[in-house]
């Protein structure tokens, strides 16, 4: 019976370690005071955005974090820890967790790991103010496109002036 528990623990650790490796963002929370219904509401809200929320023993989470980018946040594994994990857009993850925190203050945010770097609660709040990834990419594309379009307008203006000069020269010689 005890061996089965060890096998289950090692399975949980390896599964969590795989999730930590793939994650672009991880937010650590203290879920004390939340009832099952409230945790389910949090999970459902995150799941609708392709995010997940896990409640794991600290010792297993610490073991799973070793060798992953999440190891930067080992100090966050104190007390009961709930882990929100996002694989695509870390800004969306932070926004969703903080959004839930505003509606239910029992969920306390401890910190997080975004793109391999540890973030305090204050940094997570600033990250949540960023526009979504798609908006950031379109802003970047616009910024990169601006010099090229300016150059094209400049070239066009030069060609138009040249055409006017040639036309004026024709008219002058025609007189």
Image (cartoon, rainbow, N blue to C red):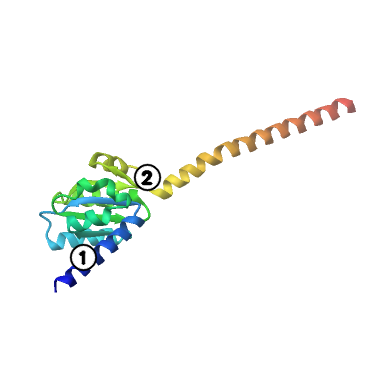
Q: Is residue 17 left or right of residue 59?
A: right
Which residue is painted at 73% across and 34% down in the image?
A: 159
Say which quadrant the N terminus sits in: bottom left
Which structural element holds mark 1?
A: helix
User: What is the spatial separation of the Cα atoms under label 2 and label 1, in whole angstroms?
Assistant: 39 Å
The number of numbered badges drawn on the structure is 2
Q: Which residue is mark 2?
A: 131
Which structural element holds mark 2?
A: loop
- Are there few (<14), some (14-19), or many (20+) residues within 10 Å of tag 1? some
Say which quadrant the C terminus sits in: top right
Looking at this view, is 58 or 37 the one in front? 58
Q: Which residue is mark 1?
A: 9
Q: Residue furthest left?
A: 33
Give how far across and how far down residue 46 sits, in percent: 27, 58
Which residue is painted at 37% across and 52% down in the image?
A: 89
Looking at this view, is 82 or 125 the one in front? 82
Q: Is residue 131 left or right of residue 47?
A: right
Give how far across and how far down residue 125 sits, in percent: 26, 42
Q: Residue furthest right?
A: 174
Please say if the residues under marks 2 and 1 sit with CB atoms less than 8 Å apart: no
Residue 57, quarter of the rendered image: bottom left
Q: Is residue 47 left or right of residue 146?
A: left
């Amino acid at each position: 019976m005890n061996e089965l528990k060890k096998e289950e623990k090692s399975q949980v650790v390896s599964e969590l370690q795989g999730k930590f490796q793939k994650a672009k963002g991880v937010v650590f929370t203290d879920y004390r005071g939340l009832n099952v219904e409230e945790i389910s509401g949090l999970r459902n809200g995150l799941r609708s955005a392709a995010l997940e929320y896990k409640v794991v023993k600290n010792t297993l989470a610490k073991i799973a974090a070793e060798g992953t980018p999440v190891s930067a946040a080992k100090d966050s594994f104190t007390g009961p820890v709930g882990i929100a994990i996002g694989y695509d857009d870390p800004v969306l993850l932070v926004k969703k967790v903080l959004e839930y925190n505003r509606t239910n203050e029992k969920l306390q945010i401890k910190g997080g790991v975004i793109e391999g770097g540890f973030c305090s609660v204050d940094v997570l709040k600033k990250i949540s103010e960023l526009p979504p990834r798609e908006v950031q990419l379109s802003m970047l594309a616009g910024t990169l496109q601006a010099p090229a379009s300016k150059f094209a307008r400049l070239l066009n203006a030069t060609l138009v002036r040249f055409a006017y000069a040639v036309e004026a020269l024709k008219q002058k010689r025609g007189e």
